[in-house]
Image (cartoon, grey):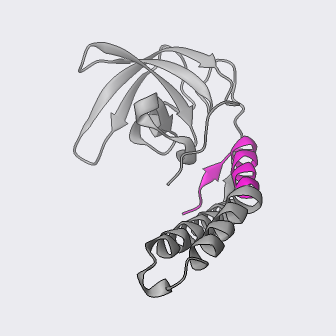
Amino acid sequence: MKNQLTKNDIKKIQEEIDYRKLVVRKEAIEAVKEARAQGDLSENFEYYAAKKDKNKNESRIRYLERMIKTAQIVSDESKEDEVGINNTVEVYMEDEDETETFKLVTSIRGNSLKGMISTESPLGRAILGKKAGDRVYVAVNENAGYYVQIRSIKNTDDQNDKIRSF
């Protein structure tokens, strides 16, 4: 499945790739050289730790490059009165009798602990494209779901959101 990313997501991913290639890679190579210079590699924990960090960085670079290569570009623009990507939405949860606020984002930036839900989550999928005042059924699976009512929609800036690291 292709990741759905906005142009801004791709820009942020590219910035991380550049940082990892230009800064982190050089630091990791230097750490490996320093650890190797300490002598016997068979009992050199620092050498193995430095190699592991270097390989982890290279793996992250490959992962991010593959993500950009296979991404499906989606627009983060929406109509003024519709729920879209980067909108902050106030939702009334009928079963819990509570109102919660979420920001709808692409899957790479989803972080429910920070109130950012993915457009691919059950709630995100259900409210995407809906309007304030709409009552929407959120299907969790084939047998379960719940109703929510969209109370308000605000356009928000995503310039400060970070890409989630894996």
Residue 158 in magenta stretch: no
Query: Of residues 23 and 159, which is closer to you in this image?
Result: 23
Query: Of residues 51 and 136, which is closer to you in this image?
Result: 51
Task: Identify which residue is drawn at 40% across, 32% down.
Answer: 113
- As drawn, the residue found furthest toward the front would be 39
Image vertical order of residue 61 relative to residue 127, above or below:
below
Image vertical order of residue 15 relative to residue 91, above or below:
below
Which portion, as a residue range, is magenta?
Answer: 1-19
Left/right placement of residue 133 relative to residue 98 reads right
Residue 146 placement (x, y as % from top left): 28, 30
Q: Main secondary structure of the magenta part?
A: helix
Residue 14 in magenta stretch: yes
- Which image quarter: residue 82? top right
Q: How many marks?
A: 0
Can residue 90 be seen? yes
Left/right placement of residue 94 relative to residue 91 reads left
Image vertical order of residue 129 relative to residue 139, above or below:
above
Left/right placement of residue 122 relative to residue 78 reads left
Can residue 65 be seen? no
Quadrant assignment for the N terminus = bottom right
Task: Identify which residue is drawn at 76% across, 47% down.
Answer: 11
Query: Of residues 45 and 83, which is closer to you in this image?
Result: 45
Image vertical order of residue 119 relative to residue 50, above or below:
above
Task: Identify which residue is drawn at 62% across, 30% down.
Answer: 86
Residue 64 placement (x, y as % from top left): 64, 61
Task: Identify which residue is drawn at 46% across, 30% down.
Answer: 114
Residue 9 placement (x, y as % from top left): 68, 45
Residue 160 placement (x, y as % from top left): 66, 30
